[in-house]
Image: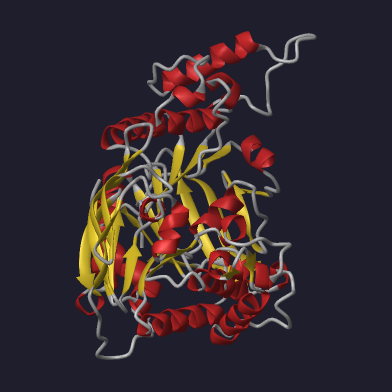
Amino acid sequence: MLETNREVIMRAENISMVFPGTRALDNVSYNVYKGAVNVIIGENGAGKSTLMKILSGVYSPTQGKLFLHEKPITINSITEAAECGIGMVHQELALSENLSVADNIFLGREKQRGIHPIDRKTQYEVAASVMKRLKQDIDPNELVANLKVGQKQLVEIAKSLVYEVDILILDEPTSALSSKEIEILFDVIRDLTAQGVSIIYISHRLEELMEIGTYITILRDGKFQCEASVKDISVPWIVREMLGNDPVTNFLPENREFGIKIFEAANITLINESEHKLVDDASFYVREGEIVGIYGLMGAGRTELFECILGEQHYSGKFYLNGKIINNKIPTSDRIKMGIGLVPEDRKQSGIFPVSSVANNLTISSLWKRLSGLTISENNEKEAVNHIICDLSIKVSSADVEIQALSGGNQQKVVIGRSLLTEPKLLLLDEPTRGIDVGAKGDVFEMMVRLSNQGIGILFSTSDLKEIMAVSDRVLVMSNGKITADISRKETTEADLVLASAQGF
């Protein structure tokens, strides 16, 4: 049990949060200590983000109470949270690139003077003062688009500090920062805690937590697991408490056999406009009939690597498919025709055409295979659609039904089926089970194994350890753009993968 004389500025008591079909938080109690860095950690789906959204007014809990300075409070909105001195900086930056630093800081809550709609002089002065507090020499009139990623992160923090927050929630604040920018952020955090600000710090980077944290709270499967002083623990202790001893389901049969190397990546590097390496000299291979899982946390570079493979980013290095070089000049459409298929991470945003039929969603990427002269063969298209619906067990009354009428799991099967109709040699699956229920996850895993048995090489990414261990023949771990491990699933453990994911920065 944690022993401390430090004041608890805020606490959550017996908080539960229930969504349809899911209990995201189950009777969780949580302390926020004044003037300290309060680290909160847990596996993907442990409930960290849900708890933080309750503290910052995004959600109202299904059950439980919040206390501020030992007085009960109710927070029903972000505005009410701000009035209580609580601010949150989300991992995905919410800045308007075409506006100045000062305009971003005051966006939606502009200062006014007399008949003037915006008091730009006061906004400039306040923004300059906050930037000075953050030890940044950034002109408040500078366009955000001209700033580096680390500076943009600090502008997000400035948006909260303008209102003199007592509690500042930082969600994965270093996921896109360089080592130098992380040092600057840590200096800012130390200054803020010295001024009495309480920091809630969410991150998966274990060594980083050991450096900046004061106290640590671990959630597991939506429940409170433990609380401790960082000085009293170690990285292996964190891993042990995070993972527990739940058995992992294995979807792979014994004695799996693979063919030749069907796909290779050699020294792939992707650098963004801030000269940050999103993918850093990545090299690996996939064999015929092999399922290779890429484990990594948000910001590790998994999605960016997939974008390179599809030709959606301008990278350095080389890809090979069946021994043939795929260079930067080959567009995405030609890569698909060569035999690369993709099931994207965000199904609703970039995976489906919601008001179009299941049939149209299935065949849109392979119409070139249905040509009969200058027209599309309706019989060929219908046969292909019926074959995929049957083969993938897509539950739909008719192929003419709009895809948005299907469950999340069946929508995902349609997106996978679309890629299969292009007859891929390599199938890329980016977070293939996101947003679908447990039963549908099992269906997707069984489908992946069945497709691999047909000789298709499968490369899939996830931030869920149990998924990686359930269906991977071999595991690649990515951290900060680097591949930090390449190992057979039989020769590794969940703890090994967590430690590898904390390397590379």
How many numbered discs sit on the rendered protein? 0
Res 389 → quadrant = bottom right
From the top left corner, tell me how far across and down residue 259 is, in percent.
24, 79
Foreground pick, 441 / 311 = 311
From the top left corner, tell me how far across and down residue 256 is, in percent.
27, 86
From the top left corner, tell me how far across and down residue 281 is, in percent.
22, 48
Which residue occupies 56% across, 58% down?
A: 50
Q: Can residue 167 be spotted in the picture?
A: yes
Image quadrant containing the C terminus: top left
Q: Can residue 234 be spotted in the picture?
A: no
Foreground pick, 180 / 411 = 411
* Color theme of the render: secondary structure
Q: Residue furthest right?
A: 115
Q: Residue furthest bottom?
A: 254
Foreground pick, 24 / 275 = 275
- Classify 407 as above or below 205: below
Res 235 → quadrant = bottom left
Which residue occupies 50% across, 28% down?
A: 158
Foreground pick, 334 / 289 = 334
Image quadrant containing the N terminus: bottom left
From the top left corner, tell me how far across and down residue 317 is, in percent.
25, 47
- Classify 479 as above or below 123: below
Which residue occupies 60% across, 64% down?
A: 364
Q: Residue furthest front?
A: 373
Which residue occupies 65% across, 35% down?
A: 83
Judge from the rendering whether residue 316 lies leftward or rightward of residue 299; answer left or right.
Answer: left
